[in-house]
Amino acid sequence: MLDAPTFLDFSIRLENIHDDVHGWVGGSMSRVPIAAFDPVFWAHHAMIDRLWRLWQLRHPGAQPPFSLLDDALPPFRAVVQQTLDVPALGYDYASSTSSTVVT
């Protein structure tokens, strides 16, 4: 997945994994209105975010399509381009190197 050459290729692969985990865990995780009440949800989404960061490190300069950069992210007062620089958001991952192996 991290070898996906474009944002769109990566996002499709990541979304498939994301959705599969929700279904595999089942229970409240498989029900959108209440998934966030399951503690597994938070660990799962932290890993999805980490994979995004690792992909960014392997593909410097790659970004979502320009047409998405100003899309709003409700309920937050942010748009896509304000969320692309992970360290600027005030956090990062301990093993954030482009050589980290994840398939």
Image (cartoon, grey):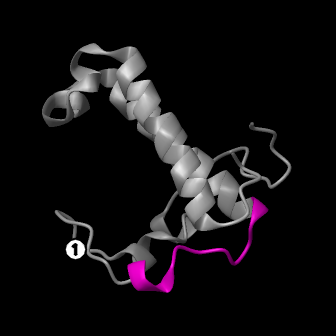
In depth, the one of 29 and 57 nearer the eye is 29
Residue at figure coordinates x 22%, y 74% from the top left: 77
The quarter of the picture where residue 95 lies is top right
Question: Principal SS element in the magenta part?
Answer: loop
Q: Is residue 79 magenta?
A: no
Q: Of helix, strand and loop, which one carries label 1?
A: loop
Q: Is residue 99 above or below residue 24?
A: below
For the N terminus, the image quarter is top right
Residue at figure coordinates x 49%, y 63% from the top left: 90
Residue 70: % across, % down = 35, 84
Q: Is residue 59 magenta?
A: yes
In the image, taking residue 7 as reference, residue 49 lies left or right, namely left
Judge the density around disc 1: few (<14), some (14-19), many (≥20) Cα neighbours within 10 Å. few
Residue at figure coordinates x 15%, y 30% from the top left: 34
The answer to whether any part of residue 68 appears in the image is: yes
Residue 40: % across, % down = 37, 23
Give the farthest residue toward the left. 33
Query: Where does the magenta region start and end?
Result: 58-68
Residue at figure coordinates x 29%, y 74% from the top left: 78
The amino acid beneath tag 1 is Arg
